[in-house]
Image (tube, grey):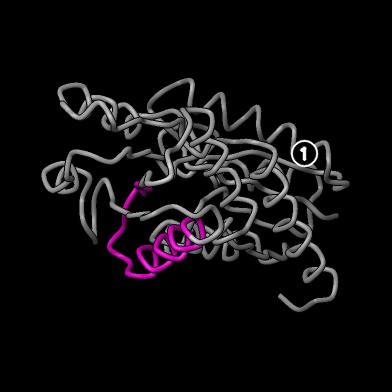
């Protein structure tokens, strides 16, 4: 029997966990799979191992692992596969397959634009700053740069820069120090949920003097994110049924 295990990141902020659960429950209603469980990578429960055990206890013989992550970094490339390898050894009778993060997708570009429009009316010379979580993986910077370039080209912004809260690439703190006060700047956190990282961005901007800098809502769990996730799920299930993975 086929099962799906959704793996969200987790957060120390209760609201962030609740957002993830509510979003994934709405996604579950669109997927015609008999067993669907939600788990968390860290900072919340159930854990990945507990989620896998729950699927198996319900009769799962095949489990499709779906990461609820924006980009392919350490968590997607190493942490989750490590948990899957452990599960394969413990449950050799179960077939495990693993999906892709949300990645670079046109619908997510549209959501970024929606967040900007919700925050204000961009002037013709408005700039945008997209803030990523951060990683030591250079692929994350490349993907966020692709997203920024597509946002700039599709919606005709003068510039769309990127920075990160930690890891490789320019940091948000460095951007604040170098930013030239003048043109309107919309800051969009490329984050899925309410959490400590979003709170840190708000705190860093509290004493910032440039009133032309506008903090937008995070990317979040909107209808476009849901559509992209459902697309990723069906790609994985389709390959699973064909025996490709």
Give the mark count: 1
Residues shaded magenta: 129-152
- Which residue occupies 85% across, 48% down? 33
- Establish if 139 lies above or below 36: below
Chief secondary structure of the magenta portion: helix
Q: Quadrant of residue 50?
A: top right
- Establish if 9 lies above or below 70: above
| Of 161 and 138, the residue lying toward us | 161
- Residue 123, x across and y down, in percent: 42, 39
Q: Is residue 137 magenta?
A: yes
Which quadrant holds the N terminus? bottom right
- Establish if 117 lies above or below 93: above
Q: Is residue 138 magenta?
A: yes
**Which residue, given by chain and number where applicable, does mark 1 sit on?**
28
- Which residue occupies 60% across, 62% down? 100
Would you say 179 lies left or right of 195 here?
left
- Which residue occupies 64% across, 62% down? 99
| Of 113 and 227, the residue lying toward us | 113
Would you say 21 lies left or right of 147 here?
right
- Residue 95, x across and y down, in percent: 72, 65
- Which residue occupies 36% across, 30% down? 215
Q: Quadrant of residue 113?
A: top right
């Amino acid at each position: 029997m086929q099962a799906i295990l959704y793996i969200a990141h987790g957060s120390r902020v209760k609201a962030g966990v609740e957002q993830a659960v509510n979003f994934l429950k709405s996604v579950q209603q669109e997927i015609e799979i008999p067993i669907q469980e939600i788990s968390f990578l860290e900072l919340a429960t159930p854990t990945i191992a507990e989620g896998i055990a729950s699927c198996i206890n319900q009769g799962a013989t095949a489990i499709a692992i779906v990461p609820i992550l924006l980009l392919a970094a350490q968590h997607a490339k190493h942490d989750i596969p490590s948990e899957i390898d452990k599960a394969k050894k413990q449950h050799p009778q179960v077939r495990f397959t693993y999906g892709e993060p949300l990645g670079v997708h046109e619908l997510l570009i549209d959501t970024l634009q929606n967040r900007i429009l919700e925050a204000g009316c961009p002037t013709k010379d408005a700039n945008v700053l997209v803030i990523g979580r951060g990683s030591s993986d250079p692929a994350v910077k490349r993907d966020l740069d692709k997203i920024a370039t597509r946002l700039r080209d599709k919606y005709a912004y003068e510039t769309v820069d990127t920075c990160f809260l930690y890891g490789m690439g320019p940091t948000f703190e460095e951007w604040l120090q170098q930013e030239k006060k003048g043109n309107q700047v919309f800051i969009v956190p490329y984050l899925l949920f309410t959490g400590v990282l979003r709170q840190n961005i708000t705190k860093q901007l509290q004493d910032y003097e440039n009133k032309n800098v506008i903090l937008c809502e995070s990317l979040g769990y909107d209808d476009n994110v849901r559509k992209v996730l459902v697309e990723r799920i069906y790609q994985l299930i389709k390959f699973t049924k064909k025996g490709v993975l």
